[in-house]
Every structure is written in structure tokens, then in C-alpha cells.
Image: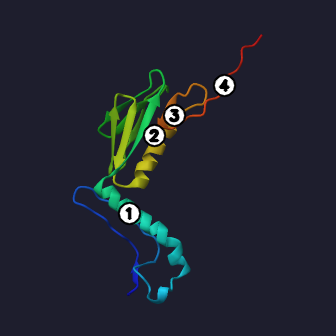
Amino acid sequence: MQRLSVAEVLVQVPVLGVEPVVVGEFALGGVAGGQRRGEDRALHGLTRTLIANMVEGVTKGFEKRLEIQGVGYKAEAKPYGVNLIVGYSHPVKYEAPKGIKISVENNTVVKVEGADKEVVGQVAAELRSVRPPEPYKGKGIRYQGEQVRRKAGKTGAK
């Protein structure tokens, strides 16, 4: 079998586009006699997963959901991204990067969708970092289904 030296892979459909992924020089396909370089073995699983994620991203897409908890906390969908009202003296504006769609359900659930798994996760992490959940009352922005470890407050003074 012939050794294919690949510098980038591009997976694309007409509706969604994904940036090419560069993973060094990696041999796609088998090598005669089963001889493989150490770098090829090290990058094999990574490359396979990156390509599988790109294919899944352009066919199904990826999504992350964030819940907003707290009295008066809410999110508003805007053309540029999302406006978060989470207890600061001003609303926090977040502009979505290219290829990411942010929608809001019931003012308290923010849905981040896109074709690139890495960017979807990064946007969700940036939104969560605006007001991460605090351990005493549990207020803040958390991933859907995330369990926040609660702490006991101070006991009353005598």
C-alpha cells in the first residue's frame, strides 16, 4: 500500500463549512510490512477522532446547553449573539464567532450549536465563565445536567 502524506483534511457540505485540521505529517492508509514510525502511532487515534468529529459536525452538528439559575438572571438572543443579564450593573454582550448559532429557550436555557466541536465547547465555556455557578446558593451559568457542589453557609453568631 502506498504511504499518503497528509498535511490537512477538509470535510465540507454546501450548508456548513469546517476549517481544515492540520495534524503534522501523518500516514493515512497502511504501510507495507506493518512498519510505522513512532509519530504515526502517536497521532493515529488523534487524527481518527478529529476526522470523525469533522464528519459528525457537518452531518449532525454539535450542541451544548447552558442553564442560567438565579433570581432575575436571564439571557436574550440578539442578532450578534446573546445578551446575558446575570447580576452585574450592566448586561454582558457576547458576540458569537462565525459558524456558531446561539439561541435562547425560556430566557434561562442557552443553546450553542455549530459544526466544529472545539469551537462549540469553547463558546459554551466562555459563556459559563461570565458567571460560573457559586457553591453557596448555586446561582450562575452551568452546563445542563452539571452538578454543583454546595457548601454550608456560616452558622449564626451567638
Q: Position of residue 33 (x, y in %)?
A: 47, 89
Mark 4 vs 1, N-terminal side: 1
The residue beneath circle 1 is: 52
Tell me the CA gap for discs 1 and 3.
33 Å
Q: Which mark is residue 152?
A: 4
Tell me the CA gap for discs 4 and 2.
27 Å
Query: Is mark 1 in CB contact (under 8 Å) with mark 3?
Result: no
Tell me the CA gap for discs 2 and 3.
8 Å
Q: Residue furthest front?
A: 33
Q: Which mark is residue 131?
A: 3
Q: Residue at x 43, y 64 (%)?
A: 49
Assess disc 1: are there few (<14), some (14-19) or many (≥20) residues with their C-alpha within 10 Å of its C-alpha. few
Tell which tag, 1 or 3, sits nearer the viewer: 1
Q: Residue furthest right?
A: 158
Tell me the CA gap for discs 4 and 1.
44 Å
Query: Residue flagged by tag 2: what amino acid is it?
Result: Leu
Assess disc 4: are there few (<14), some (14-19) or many (≥20) residues with their C-alpha within 10 Å of its C-alpha. few
Query: Is mark 3 in CB contact (under 8 Å) with mark 4?
Result: no
Tell which tag, 2 or 1, sits nearer the viewer: 1
